[in-house]
Amino acid sequence: MNEHATNETSGLGGRLPLLLPDTLDEAQRTLHDRLLATRARHAEEAGYTAALPDGRFIGPFNALLRVPHLAAPLLEWAEALTRVGIAADVREVVVLTVAAQWRAEYALYAHTAAAGKAGLPEQAIKALHRGEAPRGLRPDAEVAHRLATALVRDHRVEHDLYDEAVAAFGTNTVIALVTLVGQYLSTSALLACFPGTGTPLGP
């Protein structure tokens, strides 16, 4: 596999140089096309960058392109979670809560933009980015934040919080929220092991 990095991306690939589309093998190319049609399109709609104009992916996608046999089922997992029906603001609160605990900079960059599109108040987004308790959330989004914090920071969910979450969402959606936390724990771990030196908007 031929790996390329160029000066104009200022090390966005970090430990894993960004891959040009014409260097990919068949399986990687299939995955690349799928990512363009799904994740890159979603990123453009939300206001952040997943792929550069020349087709190179950044963030966790740069690592995942190297392992299409692993990335494909992970994408199925992510797409299944989008079909569960978690409200957009609740989803972004959970993602930002996880990313803030890990200081996963690309996830914070991307989901700060997505949170704005989902209608989260600016001050709440800033608090989430800092790993602080946000104000101004809808009640169920606030419960989701406390649930995600309990899982990622405290590694346990007390009975009262569990009962609140079930009352707010129902058992099946609580399971989906816990799974969403797991998805972004995986993403944050990828970003921790294979960091770039910044985002397309700077460090």
Image (tube, rainbow, N blue to C red):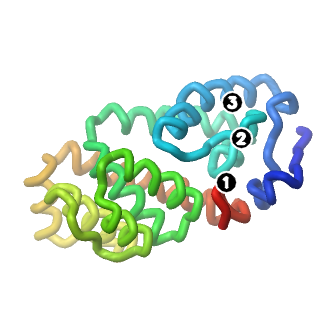
The amino acid beneath tag 3 is His
Q: Quadrant of the C terminus?
A: bottom right
Judge left or right: residue 25 versus residue 142: right
Report which residue position mark 3 lands on.
Answer: 32
In contact (CB < 8 Å): disc 2 and disc 1: yes
Q: Amino acid at mark 1?
A: Pro
Tell me: 38 left or right of 179. right
- Residue 163 drawn above or below residue 154: above
Mark sitting earlier along the chain (2/3): 3
Which quadrant of the figure has residue 143? bottom left
Q: Kindly identify which residue carries mark 1.
A: 200
Q: Where does residue 55 sit, x and y in percent of width and height?
A: 74, 34
x, y (%) of residue 2?
91, 40
- Which circle's residue, 3 or 1, is located before the other in the chain? 3
Mark 3, secondary structure of its residue: helix
Whether residue 155 appears in this view of the structure is: yes
What is the CA distance from the residue labelled 2 to the residue labelled 1? 9 Å
Q: Residue at x 79, y 46 (%)?
A: 18
Lower sequence index among marks 2 and 1: 2
Residue 53 in the image, given as x and y percentages of width and height: 73, 36
The alpha-carbon separation of the residues under discs 2 and 3 comes to: 12 Å
Closer to the observer: label 2 or label 3?
2
User: Can you tell which mark lies on residue 52?
Assistant: 2
Q: In this orientation, which residue lies closer to the viewer: 80 or 93?
A: 93
Asked where in the image residue 68 lies, by quadrant, the reply is: top right
Amino acid type at image mark 2: Leu
Q: Nearer the viewer, residue 80 or 108?
A: 108
